[in-house]
Image: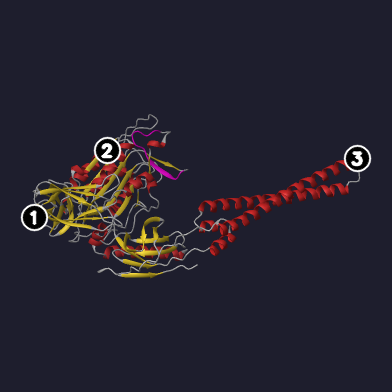
Amino acid sequence: MPTLRYFFRFSLLLLFFSYLLYPQSKRGFFPVADSLSPEMTVGNYYALIVAIQSYGDPNISSLDQPISDGARLEQVLRGEYGFNQENILFLRNPTREEMFATFDDLSKKVDSDDNILLFYAGHGYWDESRGQGYWLPSDAKKDNRSKWISNGDLRDQIRGLKSKHTLLISDACFSGGIFRTRSAFEEAEPAITELYRNPSRKAMTSGAMTQVPDKSVFVDYLVKRLRDNQEAFLPSQRLFAEMREVVINNSPLRQAPQYGTIMETGDEGGDFIFFKSSAIRKSNTLIVSTNIEDAEIRLNGNYLGKSNPIWTGRKVNPGKNVLEVRKQGYATVKKEVEMPESGEFRVNIDLEILHLADIAVDVSQSDATVYIDDRIVGKTSASKLSVKVREIAWGEHLVEVEAVGYKKFQQKVILSENKEYPFAVKLKRTSAKLVFNGSTASKIFLNDIYTGDAPTKGLEVPVGSHEIRLSQPGYEEFQQDVMLLPDKQVTINYRMARKTTTTAITRSLIFPGRGQFYQDRNAMGYVYSGFFVGALVATGYFQNDVGNKTATYNGAYDAYSQERSLPLIPAKREALKKADDDLTSATSMRNYSLIALGGVYVLNLLDVVLFVPNWVYAPPIVDLSYSLENLGTIKLQSSMNF
C-alpha cells in the first residue's frame, strides 16, 4: 500500500510540472487549428429544434422551459455561428407526424457537404423491459405507444440524412438511451481539419439513464458556452468536455451529461464543428434554368447533368468558366460565367428551337426495334406496328429497323420540310437456299410441313436448324437434319430406297400393323394394331384371373382335405367344386384370348403378303446439282438403305 501511495503522489507531481512546462496555447484536451486547410470548404448549417412542453394527454405532465430553451439556442446559433434564419426549423409542440414530415423535408434539402444540429427538449421515457428509449411528441398517449418515437426510429431518421456531420443534442429524461455504447468523452483528435474531413454522427445528452429537472441547467451552460466561445472552431467534443463537469456540479439531481457516437448511422470518426460566422467559408452554387427539360449542362467541356428544367451544382471553381447548354433539335448555347467564391450564381438559358420534322415508321413485323442515327426510338408490338418520332432536326438521318430472323433494314433520309415523313418497312426474312439432287421425285417436308417437290434447283427457307424429310409412295422416307446459315446454299444429294414385301413382313413380325403402315395402308395398320393390343391386354387380364382362381382353388382344396367334422364336409366339398368350376372357366377364357392373339398375328402376316400395293415407281430423274455465284456451297452427302 505505501508503494501505491508514493506512485500516486509521483504521478500527480509529474502532471503538475507537465502542465507548467507545456506551452499555454497547447493546454487542454483538444488542440485547435487556426484555420481550415485551403482545400476544405464548408457546406450549409441546418438546425432542427424540437421543443415540446404541452401534451394533449392529461396523464402526461406539461413542462415550462423547453420552448424558451429552444429559443435561446436558436438565438445563439443564428447570431454567433453559421446558421441562416431560413435553415433553422423550430418545431413548437409538434406531433409525431409533424416531426417525421420535417425529417423527410430535411433529408431532401440537405446535401452531402452540409451539417445538421438536432435539438430536442421534452419528455423522455426508458422502458427497461424492452431496452428501448422514447421521445414523447405532443400527441403521445401514456398508455399507447403508437405515437411515441423510439430510439430506433430516431436512428433510422438520422441514417437517412446524407449530411457531412450530424449532432444530436437531447435534453430529456433517460436521453442517454440513444447510445448503443457511450463514454463520457472521447480522445481528442489532432486538428479541426481532420475532424471535419470525416463524416460524423454524434449525440450529446443532458443525462444518462435518469430523470432531469424541468429547469435545464444543461441548456443554460450549453448556450452560455456557445455564447462565450471566442475560438473560430469549436468541436462538439470540446464543447461537451468543457461543460460536463459544471453541469454535474450545478444540477440539483447531479445529472451527468453523456456524449458518444450514434452507432450504425454512418459515423466515420469525424466531429461536428461549430464555426464562428467570421470563419465559415461557404461553397458556391451554380443554378442553371432552361426553357426546356433534359438539356445537357456542361462546364468547361465536362458533362454535369440535365436540367429539369433547373439544374443545381455546388463547388464550382471560382472565376471564369465556360457554360454550355445543348439538346438535339435546339441551337447550342455557350456562355462565359464569372463564379463567385461563395453564394449562388444563377444563369437563365433559353434554347432556340431548330427546324424540325417528324418521322413515322410502319413496320410489317412485331417485336422490331427502330433506330434513328444509332439511337433506339421505339419498338413495335402485335398491337402497335408503327413508331412515330417527333421533332427531329432537319438534315440527313439514318433509319434502321431490326427484328430477329429478318434482314436489317437501312435507309438514309434527308429532312428539309416541316412535315411527317412516312416509312413503310417490309422486313424480309433472313434465308438460305436448299438444293435437292436425286433420281426420284418426292415431296419435301420441312419440320413436318410440306414445302415443295424434289429434286429442285433452289428452295429458299428460313435460317436455323431444320428437320428435312422426303416422302414418295413406294419408297423409304429420307430424313436428315441440317443447319442453315444466312445467305448460304446447302446441297443435299438424296437416294430413295424402294419398299419391299420382305421389309413389310419383317416389320409385321415385330409388331402387327407396322407392315401395313410401311405399305402405306394406314387404315389396316390401325385395325391390326388395335386388335393386337386388345388381344394382348385380354390375355394378360385372363392370365392374372387364372392365377387368382388357382390360389382360391388351392385354398378350398386344403380346407376340404383337412376337415374332420362330418357335418362340415358337405359345405367344404361344395366350395371346392365351385372353385374348380371358376378355375376351369378362367382357363378357357385365357386360352381363347391366346388363340385370338395368335389369330391376329397370323392374319396380319397373311394381309401383308396377299395385299401388296401396286406401287407405280417414279422414273429416274437427271441430277440437277449446281452452284450459285457469290454464295458459299455446302454439300451434305446422305443416303438411307434398307
Q: Looking at the image, can residue 347 be seen?
A: no
Q: Is residue 450 above or below residue 585?
A: below
Give the prevailing secondary structure in the magenta stretch. loop
- Cβ–Cβ below 8 Å for labels 2 and 1? no
**Sequence order check: which comes first, mark 2 or mark 3?**
2
What is the quadrant of residue 101 in the picture? top left
Question: Is the residue under label 3 in contact with that under label 2 (CB below 8 Å)?
Answer: no
**Closer to us: 135 or 340:** 340
Front residue (pair 376, 198): 376
In the drawing, what numbered circle is on residue 91? 2
Which of the two marks, 2 or 3, is nearer to us in this view?
3
The residue depicted at 26 percent of the width and 64 percent of the height is 22
Q: Give the quadrant of residue 408.
A: bottom left
Q: Nearer the viewer, mark 1 or mark 3?
A: 3
Q: Is residue 83 visible?
A: yes
What label does residue 334 carry, if any? 1
Q: Check disc 3 and report the residue beneath it.
A: 567
Crowd class of label 3 (few under 14; some 14 to 19; many from 20; radius 10 Å) = few
Look at the image and give the residue range highlighted in magenta. 130-141
